[in-house]
Image (cartoon, rainbow, N blue to C red):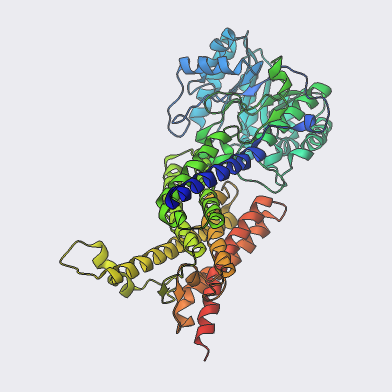
């Protein structure tokens, strides 16, 4: 066997080993695990249907903002999907297409808690109330209860007296029990509403509390608040009108959205409701992309069924039996992990092919290391794809994902080439320490390589040197761009982060890859400048740098650190996702601070 053929077989062998390790790395954290009571070895909730779910059957492109509403046929399809997991539905409006719900619900034996949406506009309120009264009287067999207004006092859209006026109007015109719905604090602030309603509809959402409650402590918290409300508002039945947990989005202190957390919450709550005889409505039936405009990713991810109307999990059985019931207590945070593992391997293969000559030139153990680095880059790109697809609720978010993925892919390609050169013992090209400041002279010197104007004769040696410097400078500018992205995100998280995600998967690859490059360079004995200096990452910085020219580096570094501290003060260190993002932001600051140290060191005689 020839030497090239043997090297190629080595490469295939390394790719196979690394691909297997990659698959295991995706499988292990995403394998189905027991959640809630089942995880504690307790009996899960008795198999059965949810009592009621919030029903807002808006599909992508539909909703109150677009004024595009579901057709009766779409509502019928959605009610059919709901009937497999719940006994009833709660609406929030008697208009906007949902006037078809009472009649269609009869077809699927679903009870309806019908509602009128109240807001600041009197003419719309009047239309809502009239529609609710009309439908309640026409469909008394399916509309079992009615709710007049939802969190109106919380939003400060109306006064308590105005809400009471609408309640009285509906009570005088329908036979069903009438209520008003709001979070528990506003019921306690307005106890006179008790005399106006037939039952109290109160919302318990531990994730959205001012002091967020994690899933592990949610059941005691719910019962504590339930008992407070029952004591403060005696004599009327209590409907927990909204209770649930999001499956995606940003963490709020100990409150972490995920599929496993949502399944654990739902399972434990169904068990609690069965034990304590609670009347409840789970929020909500389907994921709602339109809510992301108001509440970020987390706002659109409260559904028991996903956007495509498929069950996310089977907590408590939902009426299933046999093998499904035995698996009801087990949930994966990423059920589609094999797809992303495949993406990861595909991206690694692309990176390897584009660096094939560099890889084949390495001895076996360094070849294995090089392939592992390609796989790590592929995994980071696959994580970026997973984040982008799971958080895609609008066109701007999709464009953001595409842009950041392309930039990360470019950086990954440049970074892998540098890593492989270091494994091969090749030194980095020499270049002046430029820092963040744009150097117009540098840009002009590269124009002949890009503009097909005139006759530009360049020697092969000079062209090779320019290409090496160009690649290095492009990698630096990509890194600077990601650092600016990290700064922007950190400032926004500190200033207005309630509905903003922590975009870890969009920012981790560049900074982790760069720090790995610098460590590998030092281990290989190529000590060119300060350990983590950005200028030392892709080039060998020439002496004579002026620290005064790096004031933008200093500003960027100090702003990253300051914003991270402020963000952690706002979020609290109990939010592990916030801590992780702060570490990433500070890591981006390190290469710029090291640039300053390198410039000052080189300036000393």
Q: Is residue 434 above or below residue 56?
A: below
Q: Is residue 484 visible?
A: no
> Residue 264 lies in what quarter of the image?
top right
**Closest to the observer, 566 or 141:** 566
Q: Position of residue 199 (x, y in %)?
A: 73, 23
- Residue 249, above or below 83: below
Viewed as shown, does residue 219 lie left or right of 131?
right
Q: Where residue 80 sits: x, y (%)?
A: 56, 14
Q: Residue at x 46, y 70 (%)?
A: 427
- The outermost residue toward the bottom is 605
Residue 189, relative to residue 116: is it above or below?
Answer: below
Q: Nearer the viewer, residue 492 or 417?
A: 417
Q: Residue furthest left?
A: 454
Residue at x 50%, y 23% (from the top left corner): 127
Along the line of sight, the residue nearer the viewer: 239 or 293: 293
- Which residue in the rendered view is the most extreme toward the front? 1
Q: How many marks?
A: 0
User: What residue sits 49% from the left and 28% below the top?
Assistant: 124
Rendering coords of residue 153 (x, y %): 64, 37
Please identify the quarter of the rendering in which residue 490 is found: bottom right
Q: Is residue 13 visible?
A: yes
74 or 399: nearer the eye?
A: 399
* Residue 76 x/y as whole percent: 51, 14
């Amino acid at each position: 066997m020839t030497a090239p053929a043997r090297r190629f077989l080595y490469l295939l062998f390394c790719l196979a080993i690394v691909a297997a390790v990659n698959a295991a790395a995706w499988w292990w954290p995403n394998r189905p695990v027991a959640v809630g009571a089942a995880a504690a070895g307790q009996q899960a909730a008795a198999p059965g249907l949810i009592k009621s779910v919030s029903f807002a059957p808006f599909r992508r492109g539909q909703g109150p903002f677009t004024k595009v509403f579901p057709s009766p046929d779409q509502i019928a399809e959605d009610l059919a999907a709901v009937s497999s997991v719940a006994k009833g539905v709660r609406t929030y409006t008697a208009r906007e297409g949902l006037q078809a719900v009472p009649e269609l619900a009869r077809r699927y034996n679903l009870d309806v808690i019908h509602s009128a949406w109240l807001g600041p506009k009197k003419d719309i309120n009047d239309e809502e109330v009239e529609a609710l009264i009309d439908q309640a009287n026409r469909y008394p067999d399916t509309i079992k209860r009615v709710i007049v207004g939802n969190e109106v006092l919380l939003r400060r859209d109306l006064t308590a007296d105005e809400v009471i006026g609408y309640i009285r109007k509906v009570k005088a015109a329908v036979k069903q029990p009438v209520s008003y719905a709001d979070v528990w604090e506003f019921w306690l602030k307005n106890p006179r509403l008790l005399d106006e309603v037939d039952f109290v509809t109160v919302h318990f959402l531990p994730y959205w509390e001012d002091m967020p409650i994690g899933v592990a402590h949610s059941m005691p918290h719910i019962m504590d608040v339930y008992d407070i409300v029952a004591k403060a508002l005696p004599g009327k039945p209590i409907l927990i009108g909204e209770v649930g947990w999001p499956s995606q989005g940003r963490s709020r202190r100990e409150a972490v959205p995920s599929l496993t957390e949502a399944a654990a919450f739902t399972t434990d709550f169904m068990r609690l409701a069965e034990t304590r005889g609670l009347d409840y409505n789970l929020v909500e039936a389907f994921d709602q992309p339109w809510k992301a405009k108001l509440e970020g990713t987390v706002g659109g991810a409260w559904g028991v069924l996903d956007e495509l109307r498929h069950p996310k999990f089977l907590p408590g059985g939902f009426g299933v039996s046999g093998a499904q019931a035995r698996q009801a207590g087990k949930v994966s945070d990423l059920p589609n992990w094999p797809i992303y593992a495949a993406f990861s391997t595909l991206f690694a293969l692309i990176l390897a092919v584009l660096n094939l000559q560099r890889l084949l030139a390495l001895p076996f153990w360094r070849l294995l290391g090089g392939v592992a680095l390609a796989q790590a880059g592929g995994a980071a790109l696959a994580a970026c794809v997973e984040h982008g697809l799971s958080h895609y609720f609008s066109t701007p978010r999709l464009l953001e994902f595409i842009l950041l993925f392309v930039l990360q892919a470019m950086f990954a390609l440049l970074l892998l080439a540098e890593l492989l050169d270091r494994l091969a013992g090749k030194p980095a090209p020499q270049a002046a320490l430029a820092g963040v400041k744009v150097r117009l002279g540098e840009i002009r010197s590269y124009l002949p390589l890009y503009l097909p104007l005139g006759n530009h004769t360049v020697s092969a040696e000079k062209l090779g040197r320019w290409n090496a410097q160009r690649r290095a400078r492009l990698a630096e500018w990509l890194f600077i761009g990601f650092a600016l992205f990290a700064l922007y995100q950190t400032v926004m998280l500190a200033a207005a982060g309630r509905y903003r995600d922590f975009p870890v998967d969009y920012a981790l690859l560049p900074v982790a890859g760069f720090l790995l490059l610098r460590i590998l360079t030092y281990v290989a004995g190529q000590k060119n400048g300060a350990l983590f200096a950005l200028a030392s990452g892709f080039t060998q910085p020439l002496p004579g740098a002026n620290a005064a020219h790096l004031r933008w580096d200093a500003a960027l570094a100090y702003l990253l650190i300051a914003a991270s501290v402020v963000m952690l003060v706002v979020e609290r260190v109990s939010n592990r996702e916030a801590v992780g993002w702060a570490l990433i932001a500070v890591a981006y600051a390190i290469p710029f601070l090291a640039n300053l140290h390198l410039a000052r060191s080189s300036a000393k005689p």
